Amino acid sequence: MDRVLAAEPAAEPVKTPAPTPPEPSLRPRHRVTAWAAGLLLPVPALLTACRLLGTDAVTPVPQLLSLLPWCAVPAALGLLLAAAARRRALGAVAAVVLAATLWTALPYGPDATGAHGPVVARLRVLASNVEFGEATGALVTTIRRERPQLVFVSECDRACGRTLTTAFAEELPHYASVEADGSAGSVILSAYPLRDWRMLPSAMGMPGATAEIGGRSVRLQLAHPLPPLPGQVHLWKRELGLVEDAAAHEGPLLIAGDFNASQDHAAFRSVLDAGDLHDAARLTGASRTPTWPMEGPVPPYVQIDHVLVSEDFTARDTRFPDLPGTDHRAVVTDLDLHTGR
């Protein structure tokens, strides 16, 4: 019987794997989204860097630093757009910028003073910019309602000064003033006797005096430096430097007024640090409450009106009444003065 040899099966052809197609480039929509994210980040990054480095730099940085807390909005939007565009590196940068912006938005300084000893006096302080005297009538009404023992008034022209000293001749009989027209005038009204009157050499009146309160000599200083307008930033820094020098006072100290600066300005933080001062708004949980601008199409967005106190004080409450006729909110704060021993 013939042997039949089985035919070997034919070998299957070797299949060459198809080449992996290159990753598609970003779609046009994603490219636009990535560009939009990139355009949102430089301003928050610049301002946050200046804040962290402790510099006010030059125009337009000092002006834009007033908006620093609000820069968290474009930074967050940049992060969302970077994620939508699937750009990991850009998203990481946006996340860092957002985190840094949020960190710098935290209130500056401790939330309590180191005051100790019994309370020797309780007092209420009111600070207001009346805008060339236009809000004098509203301020008179506010003083009568709030009944403060100390009042610091910026942009109080001659007519404003006469009105206030006459209206409160009994309640606040002592005063230190700079009698001038327009924004150069200012006055401190006091229920306590004043002595050692001095004025800081500035474009707008910044008087100071010493009051006897609860058996302690308390230095009072009104602050109203020039605003950081383009072309006069150096003057703004110089005049805040004068306030900083006044802050290096030994003993109880109270500085109040329109500082034309927020906690995001290095020049303002230098004032706080020079005298170990505390913003009453920070001490009472009202930090970042906007006080300017109260007129015009833009809502208030920055706190530039402050009451600063030394370690001899504690603060019980701070509020910000509106005054018709001025572009600033007033600041009213209740303080306790301690013996310090």
Image (cartoon, rainbow, N blue to C red):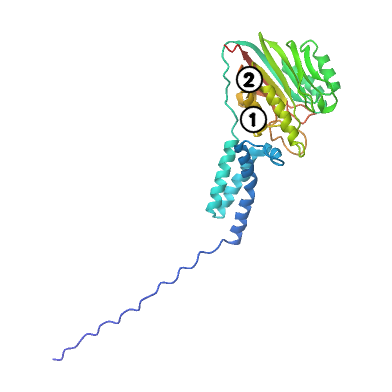
Q: Under tag 1, what secondary structure? A: helix
What is the number of the mark on residue 269?
1
Residue 290's x, y, as percent?
Answer: 68, 32
What's under tag 2, amino acid-wise? Ser
Instruction: Identify which residue is drawn at 74% across, 35% down.
Output: 234
283, 278: nearer the viewer: 278
Residue 310 drawn above or below residue 225: above
| Separation of residues labelled 2 and 1 (CA atoms) | 14 Å
Residue 267's x, y, as percent?
Answer: 67, 32
Position of the N terminus, as image quadrant, is bottom left
What is the number of the mark on residue 310?
2
Instruction: Identify which residue is drawn at 67% across, 21% down.
Output: 333
Residue 46's x, y, as percent?
Answer: 63, 43
Residue 84 visible in the picture: yes
Residue 103 drawn above or below residue 318: below
What's under tag 1, amino acid-wise? Arg
User: Is 115 placed left or right of 16 in the picture?
Assistant: right
Instruction: Identify which residue is drawn at 54% across, 54% down.
Output: 87
User: Is 90 placed left or right of 183 in the picture?
Assistant: left
Residue 195 drawn above or below residue 4: above
5, 70: nearer the viewer: 70
